[in-house]
Amino acid sequence: IKTIDLQKTFRTEEIETLALHNVNIEVNDGEFIAVMGPSGCGKSTLLNILGLLDNPTRGSYYLNGIDVSKFSEVQRTKLRKGMIGFVFQNFNLIEELNVYENIELPLLYMGISAIERKQKIEQAMDRMAISHRKKHFPQQLSGGQQQRVAIARAVVTRPKLILADEPTGNLDSKNGTEVMALLSELNKEGTTIIMVTHSQHDAEYASRIVNLFDGEIVTEIEM
Ligand code: ADP
Ligand code: ADP
């Protein structure tokens, strides 16, 4: 990942917000980055652009050597599939689908065969210690269990990059530590992780902390 003078402005009626201002960031394969900074400083905006959910207003974004900053939504979706996994603060599970079906979704989008899907889902559920709840629906699970399902869904396609937006924000410290241990393990196996967090404790799992303020990177600390 490499960005050059990344800028993002949001325009709503008369108000224009400069959410990101000349962000230059480079992330190598296998790094674990924690993005920190006060509320409203642009963390989620940066994560959304790096995750190909949104385009910058100006600047370049090189992903695997390709400038994707002007990609259309269709191109972004195609590139994102199977390569990037997302984990959110509020888990973002589909309430109408059970655990198994939630984890199955990205594989369905990728057109993976039923036999292969079953094998991959069972492996991801085992890994996240959630197999005993496969028929449960999200509302029947504790917060920690829901986040483990969300991580299983994020890793079931074996993505090279995981983007996590405050993954422990809705968890107690025990479940939070468990989720961080799982992310750390995935990172040790080679998955690149970029995580937004407010927690100094979570940031200690990272290899580098990037501090944002008013849409700009103000400091970077190697751990
Ligand atoms: P953080 O994640 O650090 O809390 P955000 O990236 O969510 O910050 O927001 C950065 C700035 O951009 C804020 O001022 C926010 O109000 C603004 N912003 C974010 N998304 C939008 C949007 N869709 N429309 C208008 N303004 C937005
Ligand atoms: P926590 O102690 O993490 O808050 P809970 O008390 O929410 O956990 O849940 C304890 C166990 O009960 C969990 O394994 C969860 O799957 C199960 N559980 C909770 N609510 C329901 C429900 N409505 N239906 C079925 N199982 C449930």
Image (tube, grey):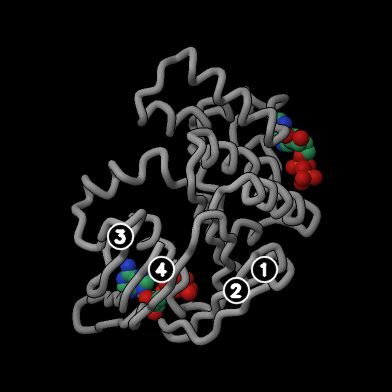
Which image quarter is the C terminus in?
bottom right
Q: Is mark 4 within 8 Å of ligand 1?
A: yes
Q: CA distance from mark 3 to mark 1?
A: 25 Å
Amino acid type assigned to the residue bearing label 4 in the image: Leu
Residue 156 in the image: x percent, y percent? 53, 33
Q: CA distance from mark 3 to mark 2?
A: 23 Å
Q: Nearer the viewer, residue 207 or 211?
A: 207
- The residue wearing badge 2 is 209
Q: Identify the mark nearer the N-term, 2 or 4.
A: 4
Which residue is pictured at 48% across the width and 50% down the height?
161
- The residue wearing badge 4 is 46
Dot 3: element: loop
Q: Nearer the viewer, residue 32 or 139?
A: 32
Residue 164 in the image: x percent, y percent? 54, 56
Q: Is residue 113 above or below residue 44?
A: above
- Viewer-nearest of discs 2 and 4: 2
Which residue is pictured at 56% across the width and 62% down the height?
195
